[in-house]
Amino acid sequence: MNQSTATTVDQLCRYLDQFAPVALAESWDNVGLLVGDRAAAVNKLMTCLTITPEVVEEALAGGANMIVAHHPLPFRALKRITADDTVGRMLLQLIAAGVAIYSPHTGFDSAAAGINQQLAAGLGLTDVSPLKPFDNPALAPLGSGRYGKLTAPQTLAQFAAVVREFLQIEYVQVVGGADQKVTQPAVACGAAGEFLGTAITLGCDCLLLGETNFHTSLEAKAQGVALVLVGHYASERFAIETLADQLTAEFSDLKCWASEQESDPITWLR
């Protein structure tokens, strides 16, 4: 998009809503413009998975006017905003500096070119469809999660290697044997163990998740469905980087970057 005048918060909101529609977000979610003045000009924008104190410091140091954060801040309704807690301190800092906050969250997860679609494409799936199509006919054929077919059967060990390569991570957790066959995987970013039953009904033999709980893992094992758990951060962070590139290409006057300071809070010790 060639801009003769400065890009505004409102223009960015409208573009993001076309790309990752707010209408696709789950009913419990808090998405869209969460902090800011729609008329304000934006010349520097930072994307991130989650706003943390380190991310706030980076945004302020870099002169960002807007943050597009996958996870909403605030997420839950607030009765007060004070410096007595981390969320309040971060909001006060960003508001004082005039930094807008936008979150696409579950709308981005489910969008036509959103996180789960990117995951499916990056892992080489074909004939990709939503795991759980939306009930609203106006939103068809979109939905939550994705599933599809591999061009050739793989073992769980082989599929896990493809996952590690695409997400650029060293480790994954798996449920299932290394030689277990994978032909029709499903993917659901973030904490998404609730999709196991749907994946089983659709005949999927493997489900990639950001994370899930112990009992869901036990149920998957009992049902003979492999799980690949990559971590909540890794299952979504890659798309935050591509989003920064996409915004840079769309708005020529905008300096846009993905946060370089945020990292997975969960690490491995030996």
Image: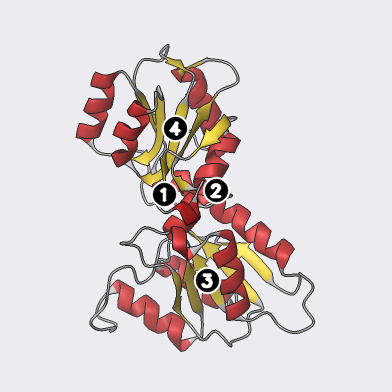
Residue for point 60% across, 57% down: 243
Q: Residue at x 61, y 68 (%)?
A: 15
Residue type pointed to by label 1: Phe
Q: Secondary structure at mark 3?
A: strand
Q: Are marks 2 and 1 in contact (CB under 8 Å)?
A: no
Q: Nearer the viewer, residue 94 or 117?
A: 117
x, y percent for residue 161 = 52, 25
Quadrant of image for the C terminus: top left
Q: Nearer the viewer, mark 4 or mark 2?
A: 4
* Amino acid type of the residue that numbered disc 3 sits on in the rendered structure: Ile
Find disc 2 in the rendering and name its residue: 238
Q: Distance between the Cα atoms at labels 4 and 3?
A: 31 Å
Residue type of the residue flagged with mark 4: Ala
Q: Give the residue pinned by disc 3.
A: 67
In this rendering, the label closer to the viewer, 2 or 1: 1
Q: Quadrant of residue 203?
A: top left
Residue 134's label in the rendered image is 1
Q: Residues within 10 Å of mark 1 (few under 14, many from 20)?
A: some
Tell me the kind of residue under disc 2: Phe
N-terminal of the pair, mark 2 or mark 1, is 1
Task: Report the label total.
Answer: 4
